[in-house]
Image: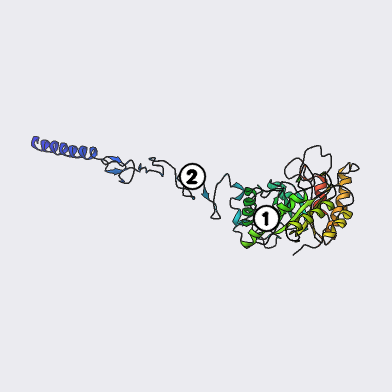
Amino acid sequence: MNYRYGFIIIAVSILQFYCSNSQESTVSGCTDTDACNYNSGANEDNGSCLYDDCLGVCGGDAVVDCTGICGGAYAVDDCGNCLHPVNDANSWNASCSGCMDPLAVNYDPDAVISGNCVYTEKSFKRGLAFDLMDPTDFTAIQDGISWWYNWYFETEAPGNYYSNYAMDFIPMLWGGSPSQNQINGVKSFILNHPEIDYLLVLNEPNLTDQGNSTPSQAASDWLIYEQVIQDLANQGRTIYLVGPAMNWGTMTGYADPVVWLDDFYTAYGNANGGQDPQIDYLAFHWYDYGLEAQLNRLMQYGKDFWITEMANWNANIDSYEDQIDQMEEMVALCENRSDVFRYAWFYGRGDLPDNHFTNLFGPNPGELTVLGEAYLNLPYTDPVD
């Protein structure tokens, strides 16, 4: 009996020895030799492996972005474009989003991300002179306005404004002697927006606090505008030149836009072998009664018109109701004259109180005044194909 018990005790001791040694020999850790925290003494991987990021930081999260920069901020949007999520926020997913309803007037068969749809037919001519940026403002006017401009050659509006709201943005080279950066900027913007067909130039040259350009100065600058059009044509784009945007002015000897235009044509012809300047459309601004008479005076130049600013600031207009009456007359004139190609109301949202009673928007985004409601719903002629 004692012998048997002794044998059992020895066997149990041997088993405990081997089990103890086996437990002590298990070392957990990272066993991947490519990891930056590889543990050569580990014989059991515990999922703790870390790797160098592109900056060489063990376990770091820096990656090479879509521009090839380690730790860069650019990323690929759902349309496959490499963009900055903050700086290019207005363009994020814009290139492939649009209205996907075939029944809408702005149906986009190429859209893969559903966007805003417009179901109301509207005037091709009717526009707005205002720096539109807020999406709720676009939604508020999408059923009645087809285009806008902001006196600049690019816009900070949502990148999919054209497909989502069926509205054209028209770029502008506002003053004379545009810089090379402005020239490059407008060409780049137009080339990146295939829907653009027009370029506005030279705002109110005979006003000393606006374009402030004499006829001879403008004749020299016109060669620059024409070269922009030619450069774009060389890259397959046909762009029509709209301008100068004339008004009754404050420049000595040139208060009358006709006097300024006559001398402009003369100055250009003298400098260019008797040729006329390229003016595809003549622009005009008017803030009083008598728009028809003003257009009739300008018919001598044989150009169709863009009225790029209009309202009535006459002192007799002292309420939105009075302004609505004037708006109805001006819009009816523009819609029914075949030589008015497009027109734009001035203004969208300005300082309060609105002493001229011309604001289409109220103080809050997306809010329309009674004038704004009226403008959207006035009658119009058949859309231009």
Number of other residues with Cα within 10 Å of mark 2, as a class: few under 14, some 14 to 19, many 20 or more: some
Taking 133 as reference, is 381 above or below it? Answer: below
| Quadrant of residue 341 within the rendered picture | bottom right
Q: Mark 1, residues whose alpha carbon is within 10 Å: few (<14), some, or many (≥20)? A: many
User: Which of these two is toward me, 213 or 127?
Assistant: 213
Q: Nearer the viewer, residue 41 or 152?
A: 152
Looking at the rendered structure, the kind of residue marked 2 is: Gly
Picture quarter with the N terminus = top left
In the rendered image, the residue lying farthest to the bottom is 385
Is residue 369 in view?
A: yes
Q: Give the mark nearest the N terminus, 2 or 1.
A: 2
User: Residue 59, how many percent across, how many down?
Assistant: 39, 41
Give the labeled residue for mark 1.
Answer: 162
Q: Secondary structure at mark 1?
A: helix
> Which residue lies under the disc numbered 2?
72
Residue 2 lies, in percent from the top left, at: 9, 34
Which residue is located at x 76 percent, y 53 percent?
244
In the rendered image, which quarter contains the C terminus?
bottom right
SS class of the residue under badge 2? loop
Is residue 240 toward the left or the right of residue 296 in the image?
A: left
Q: Determine which of the numbered discs, if any, sits on residue 187 in the image.
A: none
For the residues marked 2 and 1, what is the alpha-carbon distance in whole angstroms? 30 Å
Q: Quadrant of residue 81?
A: bottom right
Residue 211 at x, y = what percent? 75, 46
Q: Nearer the viewer, residue 53 or 173?
A: 173
Residue at position x 56%, y 46% in the image: 85
Kind of residue at badge 1 = Tyr
Give x and y (percent) for residue 122: 77, 58
Q: How is the image coloured?
A: rainbow
Q: Quadrant of residue 187?
A: bottom right
* Residue 332 visible in this rendered orientation of the protein: no
> Pointers 2 and 1 in contact (CB under 8 A)?
no
